[in-house]
Amino acid sequence: MTGWGVDGGTAWGAWVKLDAVESTQILAAAGFDLVVVDLEHTLLDLGAVARHLAVGQALGLRVLVRIPDRSPALVQRLLDAGVDGLVVPHVDSAADAADLVASTRFAPDGRRGSGGTSRAGGWGRSPRADYLSSAATVVAQVESVRALAEAHAIAAVPGVSALMLGPADLALDAGDPVADADETLVTAARASGVAVGSAGTVAAAGRASRLGLDFFVCAADTTLLARAAADALDRARSGSSSASRPSHQISERGAPA
């Protein structure tokens, strides 16, 4: 996957943590460039991934999936499903990265099994050579002090497509937020010619742009809903103008009954 953002700029992404495909539809309509379906911190299953994948790609989104671990079986199934890339947490060393990449490549370069009758293989209609030559987008998350120290080595592993900072877990590992960790990652990624990104709040988006990050995951469907719900209730309780409109006017605007 090349050209992450529009005209070479930062691509803006959001986590998808809810099963409902409406999350992906809403994020696409809002103008996000990519979504990351999160299997690490949710109860989503592969059926949910398949639904978000089909809807998201149809709407022009890049659909990545964050996996909970480096299980070769899970990697293989997601790649055969046709995901646009994998976001892999806790890649702490070059050895971890090499092991991960091996799961995404066919022999003799790796251990991925052939399944050309899958979605990625055009249901068996794509030329076999095309299926076997397809390269997975592999995003290695840097989430520990060790990983940050080895960022250059991780980025240099053939088959790693991008580095992604995991600032929350890195802060847990270090005991405090790590200053300028994103700058360290940018330097490491650029040295090996791979992409670099991070995740955080909308407030941190300006820094992401200034650093020239290729992608930044700045929202989550769950948090957007939670904040909107709390804000709506606060406004209603405070007697805001929207809450005091006549009921027929609210209904015309599609408010829930």
Image (cartoon, grey):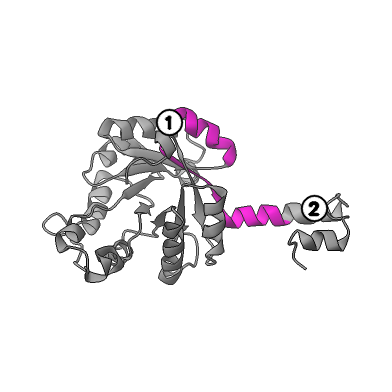
Q: At x 80% / y 53%, what residue is drawn? A: 234
Magenta residues: mostly which secondary structure?
A: helix
* Amino acid type, callout 2: Asp
Quarter of the picture containing the C terminus is bottom right
Q: Residue furthest left?
A: 108
Q: At x 64% / y 57%, what residue is drawn? A: 225
Q: Which image quadrant for residue 193?
A: top left
35 displayed left or right of 97: right
Question: Helix, strand or loop at disc 2?
Answer: helix
Q: At x 44% / y 69%, what residue is drawn? A: 45
Q: Is residue 229 visible?
A: yes
Give the camera-side residue of 112 and 214: 214
* Amino acid type, callout 1: Gly
Q: Is residue 117 visible?
A: no
Residue linked to disc 2: 234
Total number of numbered labels?
Answer: 2
Question: Helix, strand or loop at disc 1?
Answer: loop
Residue range (magenta): 202-229
| Number of the label disc, if any, that sits on residue 73 | none
Q: Is residue 220 magenta?
A: yes
Q: Are marks 2 and 1 in contact (CB under 8 Å)?
A: no
Q: At x 22% / y 55%, what residue is drawn? A: 134
121 displayed left or right of 181: left
Q: Which image quadrant for residue 221?
A: bottom right
Q: Position of residue 103 (x, y in %)?
A: 24, 58
Q: Position of residue 80 (x, y in %)?
A: 29, 65
Residue 132 higher or lower than 150, as above or below: below
Q: Position of residue 125 (x, y in %)?
A: 22, 68
Tag 2: Cα neighbours inside 10 Å, few (<14), some, or many (≥20)? few
Lower sequence index among marks 2 and 1 = 1
Residue linked to disc 1: 212
Q: CA distance from mark 2 to mark 1?
A: 37 Å
